[in-house]
Amino acid sequence: MEQIRIGTCVPGQHALTYLPHMVDKGYETFELCFHMEFYGQDIAQLAPRVMDLIAPTGQKITALGLYCNPLQHEEHKQNLKKCIDNVHLLGTDLVCTFAGALMGASVEEAMPVYKKVFTELGQYAADRGVRLAFENCPMGGVWQRETCNIAHSPRAWDMMFSEVPLDNIGLEWEPAHALKQLIDPLPQLRKYAPKVFSVHGKDTTVDWDGIHHEGMFSGKDFVPDRFPGFGDTNWRDVFYILHRAGYAGDVVIEGYHDNCYNHDWEMVGQMHALNYLKWARGGDYAPSPWVK
């Protein structure tokens, strides 16, 4: 069993600005994240500068994220190939993304395109020793009318893994995205843990009174984003399930979302989440001196 490390997501376009202020805060890992585009950044040029920043600390980059829609946009597909080609420059083999969707269409309608695109991308990644992980964020989509990511439903995962049965394709799992769909995250994690390559540390607080009174389609947010330690997820059990499944990755805090600890209070929330998750995993590893 390996100690599950705790890190945080860093917006890729701000990496060189944010990282100098974050390398001394106690994070063990970082995930470099982009949303839909690279914002003028060249990964091949950015990666060595990022590695220089963390080199003195012993911290690691564990994933490169580009959350985009490769089913709908050829440019997004080509940008994912750039991630696959350059992720080794960050010292990792993991690229995280969305599975894509056909805007306004159902999961069933998108599945033939998914099969074509990710058979190609999955094999392209496998040939280069790279893994792909889909975040389970609905991005406002529902089964019948998706937006940019069909990979939010266990039913869709089963279809996807059947259509493209490659060992290097898995999930970047987050309990908040399960809770927001009123799914109990723990049984879900037990079932799919072998396919989990990365875990996002984000949570939510479910306002059951609001849901019971007004329902999920009232236009109000009854499941606001929260940092771990402020939400409803039992992270002690999350770590237990991951450890029992042999998970050797990390949990990376996905900040910049909490509806209370944000802006000037962002790092307050980040530090609380970091300390809470280290506690929830059981603290720091201490070897048993009587075990040879």
Image (spheres, helix red, strand yellow):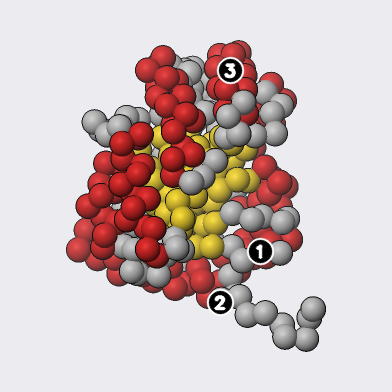
Could you say whether the residue bearing mark 2 is in a helix, strand or loop?
loop
Q: Is residue 202 visible?
A: no
Q: Which residue is mark 3?
A: 120
Q: Is residue 32 above or below residue 123?
A: below
Disc 1 to disc 3, C-alpha distance: 33 Å
Snapshot quadrant of residue 36? top left
Q: Name the residue located 48 percent from the left edge and 46 percent from the top edge.
A: 91
| Number of other residues with Cα within 10 Å of mark 1, as a class: few under 14, some 14 to 19, many 20 or more | few
Give the residue at the far bottom of this rendering: 290
Residue 165: x and y, percent?
71, 26
Mark 1 → mark 2, Cα distance in angstroms: 13 Å
Q: Secondary structure at mark 1?
A: loop
Can you tell which mark lies on residue 2?
1
The answer to whether residue 89 is left or right of residue 170 is left
Picture coordinates of residue 201 (x, y %)?
48, 56
Residue at x-position 71% and y-position 52%: 190
Of 96 and 240, nearer the camera is 96
Determine which of the numbered discs, if any, sits on residue 270 in the image. none
Q: Amino acid at mark 1?
A: Glu
Would you call the spot at circle 2 few (<14 residues within 10 Å), some (14-19), or many (20 or more)?
few
> Vertically, is 89 above or below 227?
above
Q: In the image shown, does 232 or 37 lie closer to the viewer?
A: 37
Res 230 quadrant in image: bottom left
Residue 283: x and y in percent read 56, 76
Q: Which badge, 1 or 3, is on the more N-terminal residue?
A: 1
Q: Which residue is mark 2?
A: 283
Q: Quadrant of the C terminus?
A: bottom right
Q: Which amino acid, by three-letter code, is at mark 2?
A: Gly
Q: Is residue 284 above or below residue 142?
A: below
| CB contact under 8 Å: marks 1 and 3 | no
